[in-house]
Image: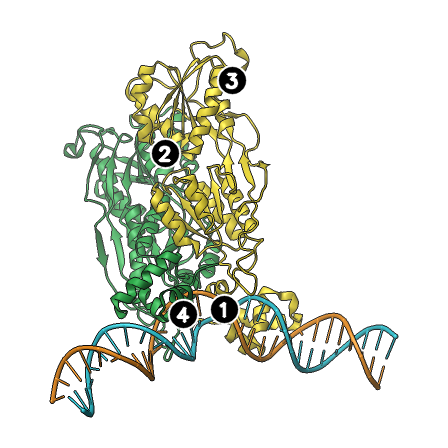
Chain colours: A yellow, B green, C orange, D cyan
DNA sequence: CGGGAAGCTGCAAAGGTTTGCAGTGAAGTA
DNA sequence: TACTTCACTGCAAACCTTTGCAGCTTCCCG
């Protein structure tokens, strides 16, 4: 029933190798023959069998996408963009969900390794050393985690957190809380570092609460702590927590932004729909997905055929580019931030005119490449 | 570099066929041999090459999942559940996004057909006849669309819409609007039919507005029409539209639920986070994903090996189960619905005590199987 | 007209696995 | 003892495609 290269060959009166070349190396076949073969293939509805092709070329034209939690609204835009970019390059994407579990993560890499040309690891929860070990098994690109010697796609949340804190300082806030995210998250460390530095530089105090689960519930549960701490502004690890916090504060009768200002991180679609609309640090999630796919595909465009002929093994994994890419973030000011107790006193210039959404920083897509090297 | 069945055979001193059987038919190999082989395989880190296996068995152990828009919050839970269920059965899933475009949809089915054992078509936008045609190319399970002769997973939004309208009637609403969804959506037709019938039965009037794009913007744009129509309650095609509508009404100074009650459909996570929290018809999205995978896998468990040996071609696609499954929905009452102008007059019993979330209807997961047949 | 190059095509091996068939040895039966 | 049965293992073909090599024509140049 399935039509193979052999059927096409028979129909068009040529050898199977000619049919093969018609598809994989058209310049090697007589134009006349080519059109005839293509016509027959079209007629018969021939589609090359990728498994057979993979078997001999060592390239599956598949990539794996490993996601901590598909239902987390942060990821779908990334998945969508990655899949689109991959398809554009004639690759298909396996998507797998780890349920935030490091063990599942590792198993999935193993399970996928033989079946894909590379894996995108998004916001991994496992250890750096394990990631490095797995990267010897299959080409890896890591999103939202920095590892020397491995290609990474990062989002400059540090810069975003700084902008957020400066925004709050400009509004006259001096007591600021940071709702920490999950332990072991690179993003979390970056935000904490940058927000701390910016607060110090502005003569303000930053109270860190956490680590916490990066969910709405996690934010909601912190409302009382925020109240007790007496801060007038809060920066949350992500939008979900920010939204949860606003809900919790509301339940305590604390109004946002009148009494407490809240800033999130991610700019998920949801943050435009809550009331008040969330001021947040927009992360270029879609761009990250596209970039990561590009890096992965470029990476394995180099070592061509797998274990074939002589000398295989010596050259395997010898040279590998390890560029790291840092994507810009931008602060999006909406309605969840407002004047603080010190408003208009010392930093009048930075206070925005109204609550209408306007943007700081660049276009979001452009990237900053940083380094390139050779790993084992 | 890649370790094959041959390496394991050499290491454990048996023939490759024995190694193969150790994995695919363990009962055929001596327990003693088996443990030795398994130990060697473990040692060497052997993973079977699925492409090679697929080549001979005709089963890739992959399935395709075609989604109109991954970024639409309705789908991620379905994707997550389907992927989990598939993995549980040792299948991997390709996820592909069509951007709501029927042509892309068709191309994706073609592209995936040879590479998967079956395809899940979620909320397809293409025509019934095209779907039927494609189903001759690759086993298909359709979610959110009813086609005779094809296995379908449906959600009983009709029942949900009826419950929603009855809820509104019970609250004393007599003028109700329905915000229609996209043209050609089976769900849309079901909701319209059931809501219309329920309204008529309750002596109320149902104004249908639409069709409309099933997005927040689509809902927002309808606020003025809703205002002009003078209705006191609205049922929206989905939560996104309901949320957009609430926002639009808010901009017009119309309060929900005091002046207008709003009900959505889907119960996306977001609907619990907006203010007011949305009353909505919960659809069992995750269960749909799991069920669809089960049906697909069960369907192609039957015709075993592809084109092999004699008689192939005659038996191909001869018998195929076409069960249709209807999943229950349930009305979740939250804060976006309240008493209408006729409250307490004629249907006092149905009015709920307070706005606190409580549930009607069953557990959501259980299914109703309907029919089984033979197609060409 | 001879020699060589160039363009195109066919041949056959290779890739990793599954599986029908045949072969082995031991155990059971008559 | 001879024969059958059984459990296990080895053999080799098959799945579909790619690709290095070699063969064939045709054409060009001297």
Q: What label does residue B57 carry, if any? A: none
Q: Please state if A188 lies on the left or on the right of B161 as rendered.
A: right
> Label 4 vs label 1: CA separation?
21 Å
Q: Chain of mark 3?
A: A
The secondary structure type at the circle numbered 1 is: loop
Identify the residue position indicated by label 1 in the image.
A45
The secondary structure type at the circle numbered 2 is: helix
Marker count (numbered): 4
Foreground: disc 4 or disc 1: 4
Q: Please state if A90 lies on the left or on the right of B270 as rendered.
A: right
Q: Please state if B295 lies on the left or on the right of A1 as rendered.
A: left
Q: Quadrant of residue B223?
A: top left
Q: Residue furthest top?
A: A345
Foreground: disc 3 or disc 4: 4
Q: From the top left corner, tell me how far across and down residue D4 is, in percent.
A: 19, 86
Choose between B17 and B127: the one closer to the eye: B17
Q: From the top left corner, tell me how far across and down residue A16 is, in percent.
A: 55, 74
The residue at 33%/72% (across/down) is B318
The secondary structure type at the circle numbered 4 is: helix
Choose between B93 and B350: the one closer to the eye: B93
> Label 3 vs label 1: CA separation?
61 Å
Choose between A273 and A60: the one closer to the eye: A60
Q: Residues within 10 Å of mark 2 (few under 14, many from 20)?
A: many
Q: Residues within 10 Å of mark 4 (few under 14, many from 20)?
A: some
Q: Residues within 10 Å of mark 3 (few under 14, many from 20)?
A: some
Q: Quadrant of the C terminus of chain B?
A: bottom left
Q: Residues within 10 Å of mark 1 (few under 14, many from 20)?
A: some
Q: Chain of mark 4?
A: B
Q: What label does residue A352 carry, if any? A: 3
Q: Chain of mark 1?
A: A
């Amino acid at each position: 029933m399935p039509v193979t290269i052999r059927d096409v060959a028979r129909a068009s009166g040529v050898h199977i190798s000619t049919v093969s070349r018609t598809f994989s190396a058209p310049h090697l076949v007589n134009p006349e023959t080519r059109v005839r073969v293509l016509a027959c293939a079209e007629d018969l509805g021939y589609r090359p069998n990728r498994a057979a092709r993979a078997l001999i070329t060592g390239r599956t034209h598949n990539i794996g996408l490993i996601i901590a939690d598909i239902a987390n609204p942060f990821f779908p835009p990334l998945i969508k963009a990655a899949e689109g970019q991959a398809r554009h390059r004639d690759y298909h994407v396996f998507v797998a969900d780890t349920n935030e579990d490091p063990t599942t993560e590792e198993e999935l890499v193993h399970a996928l390794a033989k079946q894909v040309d590379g894996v995108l690891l998004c916001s991994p929860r496992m250890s750096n050393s394990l990631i490095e070990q797995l990267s010897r098994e299959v080409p890896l690109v890591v999103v939202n985690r920095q590892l020397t010697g491995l290609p990474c796609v990062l989002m400059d949340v540090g810069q975003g957190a700084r902008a957020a804190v400066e925004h709050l300082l400009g509004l006259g806030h001096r007591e600021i809380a940071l709702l920490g995210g999950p332990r072991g998250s690179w993003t979390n460390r970056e935000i904490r570092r940058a927000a701390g530095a910016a607060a110090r530089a502005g003569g303000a105090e930053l109270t860190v609460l956490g680590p916490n689960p990066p969910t709405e519930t996690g934010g909601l549960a912190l409302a009382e702590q925020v109240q007790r701490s007496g801060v007038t502004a809060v920066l949350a690890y992500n939008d979900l927590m920010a939204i949860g916090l606003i809900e919790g504060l509301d339940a305590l009768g604390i109004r946002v932004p009148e009494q407490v200002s809240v800033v999130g991180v991610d700019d998920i679609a949801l943050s435009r729909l809550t009331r008040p609309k969330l001021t947040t640090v927009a992360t270029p999630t879609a761009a990250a997905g596209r970039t990561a796919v590009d890096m992965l595909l470029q990476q394995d465009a180099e070592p061509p055929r797998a274990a074939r002929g002589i000398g295989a093994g010596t050259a395997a994994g010898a040279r590998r580019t390890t560029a790291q890419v840092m994507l810009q973030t931008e602060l999006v000011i909406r309605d969840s931030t407002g004047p603080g107790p010190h408003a208009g006193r010392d930093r009048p210039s930075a206070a925005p005119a109204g609550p209408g959404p306007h943007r700081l920083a660049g276009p979001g897509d452009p990237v900053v490449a940083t380094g390139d090297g050779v790993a084992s």
